[in-house]
Image (cartoon, rainbow, N blue to C red):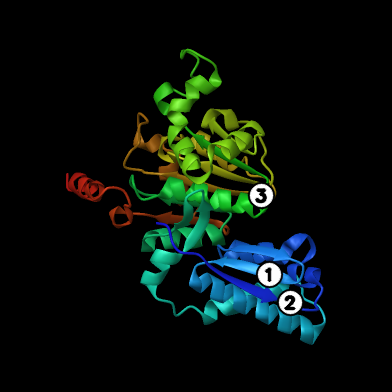
Amino acid sequence: MINRILEKIIDIKSLDPVSILGIADCNLKLIKLEIPINIIARGNKIKIAGNKRDVDQVSQIFNEMIETLNSKGDLGKSDVKNLISMIKIKDNNYNQQEINSNFIVCFSRKGAVTLKTDGQIKYCKTVRNNDVVFCNGPAGTGKTFLAVCFAISALEYDLIDKIILCRPAVEAGENLGFLPGDLKDKVDPYLAPLYDALNILYDEKKLIKLLENKIIEIVPLAYMRGRTLNNSFMILDEAQNATITQMKMFLTRLGVGSKSIITGDVTQIDLKSRRESGLVQVADVLKDIKGIGFTKLNRNDVVRHSLVKKIIEAYDRL
């Protein structure tokens, strides 16, 4: 869904821009982490762009930051975090339907990408509040596409340095040795949904550059072994087809400053036994660890053709 973007200019007047923006724009990054909005600072002018609610929130945050700086003489990270929380709590009496249609996740080459269902909103909140998130749901709910959007948003706001997208190539036995061609030729058919998401979000020229510079990597799960990924956003798609051993291997690649989203559908396991699936087991193993979140999408969150929801409902009745 593409929405009209509102813009607002905030004048910080004679204040030192660094005192408001923070060293290396750290205060801006804190705001962007909590509220999906575009912020451009030039001199003493700050331009914010997004949906009406987000623009209003960020405008209030900057006004409170300016007032705090004028009264205290300084503005720390803790001050900014508290102000963000205060404004969000104060503005919590929002209309749910408005959020569904206006909550911007990131900006694609065609415009703003927004959340469309209650389940997607809960998914987004879980990602914001945790470093590792597991999302289980049927086809068409946007779990993979939104995971890629979250990662790209973090990359564009300089919160991470790298995106790693991977899938278990279970249909090829994760061996791939018997298939003709080089590695890319062998694995691309299994990674096509990830490329599809990136092609929606980036123009071809920019995407090619990001892939060539390995800022974005798309690899089969087996090729993650032995790596440690710092300041990265790791996404494991089709995780229901990752074995328990592979799931542990993937999760332990997480380095300093990194986040991870694991998506899958436990009703679509292609392994020999359901008990082999790492996604089935993981909730019981990791449910009590702080910083790890779980969310579930269902047929009410399907955003594909209207028939997809009916097809899922029909199979659920079997």
Q: Residue at x 68, y 47 (%)?
A: 231
- The image's mark for residue 46 is 1
How far across and how far down the image is residue 187, in percent?
Answer: 49, 25
Between the C-alphas of marks 2 and 3, the distance is 28 Å
Contact between marks 1 and 2 (CB within 8 A): the answer is: yes
For badge 2, the amino acid type reads Ile
Nearer the N terminus, badge 1 or badge 2?
2
Q: Which residue is mark 2?
A: 12
| Amino acid marked by disc 1 | Ile
Locate residue 65, reporting x and y percent.
70, 78
The residue that disc 3 covers is 160
- In this image, 227 relative to 37: left or right? right
Q: Nearer the viewer, mark 1 or mark 3?
A: 1
- Above-or-below relation of 227 to 116: above
Q: Horizontal and vertical percent for residue 94?
A: 43, 77
Q: Secondary structure at mark 2?
A: loop
Q: Image height check: is 51 above or below 83?
A: above
317 displayed left or right of 297: left
Which mark, by number, is residue 111? none
Nearer to me, 33 or 295 = 33
* Mark 2 or mark 3, earlier in chain: 2
Give the label, 2 or 3, closer to the camera.
2
Question: Which of the two labelled residues, at mark 1 and mark 3, occupies the earlier sequence position?
Answer: 1
Splitting the image into 4 quarters, where does residue 280 fall? top left
Q: Assign a secondary structure to mark 3.
A: loop
Cα distance in 3D space between marks 1 and 3? 23 Å
